[in-house]
Image: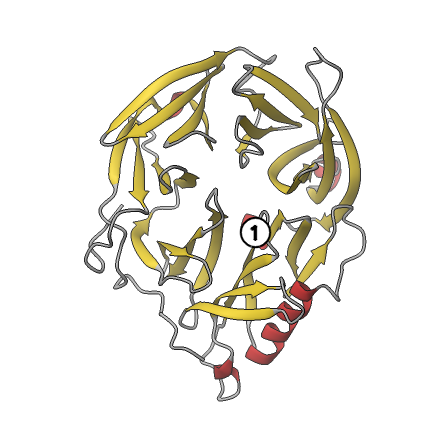
Amino acid sequence: MRELPLLSPKLPAPGSPTRYTLPVPWSKLALLLPMPLPGSVGMVTLDDALWRLELKGSELQRAQVDKEFTSQVSGGRLHAMAPPGPETLAWLQSRVIVLYDLEWKDALEYWVVGDLEEVGSAARWISLEPRVAAIRIEDSTNYLAQDRLDYRIRSYRLEEGQKGDEEGQSVLLGTLELGAMLPASPAWDAGGGLLALIRSGKLEVYGPELGKPKPEHPLALAAGKLLKEGGLTPHSVRLHPTRPIALLALGRATPPSKKEEQTPAGVWCVDWSSKAPQSIPLVEMPPGQEVQLGAFSPAGDWVYYRAESAMRMHLYVQQLGDTPGKPMYLGELPSSYDIFWTREPVALVALERVPDGLSKLVRWDMAQPPAAPGKAKP
């Protein structure tokens, strides 16, 4: 096995980041979300307006895209989703998924809960063609009587309604009950026609209908082998949106035995594009460290992840491909950061929240040459 890089603040960084002052106070911000336009971020504000924030060089340019295009643009609990097309924005808004067409300045809402006791708390795309979304749902039916919240994941196929309709058609495909324990966001993911869930120390793989798990799927088999042979614990999973590839963050609480040393703790790439699926280690991490995998970049060739060690959170990026690049260190993060990708050129953007003032957007350009190790701080 090739020598693996070890996660450490001593790794090089992709140049110093650029900081932009957010044009509205944090108290007036409803949502930041990825945008399928070059160098841009979408912003929803509490006055029910949608904005484009274009990051050009050292300047931030703000342009209003639309306002009051649904009954309440900024209402409820908003969660960003990846853009499902080159002219479309998407976000989860409590009980509906909103798809906004940038070309036609038109919004469609898709109802994705069963009743008013349910609210969506996260959403992922299982596939983009057809558009199938997985929504993690919080159910408060038993909260008053039993002091209990229940959780489940539902999948819906989103279809356009009749011309002129404000609502699209949501076709329920399946439901996966999670019980009263809320899985962390990195403990499940969707993409490439699949849903993966970490539960009871194992990785379960499902199809779009969320029926019975698929223990014979190459990803499930590869994950099971890594966990058994390495004595590892699964922390996080990410499914590539278009390719038969998944990333697994596998940790270890104690130093490995001689046998377990052959399966190092760290980030692994499982590739089942050929008849003989491969499990490729990307980076190693020391015992006691936990890694949370972030989203893939828009083209699917970069990924970010956060590593927690000694009560501190550190941010890394890594380029994927036939020969994966070495991870790069971006700096230490407080827990209040929101992180997402921009495109053309590919860059990682984090929101540095300042509750009593103007927050900052921190942008790392992946096209910049690496800086000296450990010098780039957020």
Residue sitting at 45 percent across and 80 percent down? 1
Location of residue 97 (image quadrant): top right
Residue kind at label 1, given as amino acid type: His
At label 1, counting other C-alpha atoms closer than 10 Å, the crowd grade (few under 14, some 14-19, many 20 or more) is many
Q: Nearer the viewer, residue 220 or 164?
A: 164
Judge whether 88 appears above or below 284 on screen. Answer: above
Q: 130 or 333, which lies in front?
A: 130
**Toward the viewer: 296 or 22?**
296
Left or right: 134, with 57 as reference point: right
In the rendered image, which quarter contains the C terminus? top left
Whether residue 137 sits left or right of residue 368 in the image: it is right
Q: Residue at x 53, y 26 (%)?
A: 87
User: Where is residue 64 drawn, in percent x and y?
Assistant: 41, 14
x, y percentage for residue 258?
48, 89
Q: Is residue 70 left or right of residue 130?
A: left
> Does 283 appear above or below 349?
below
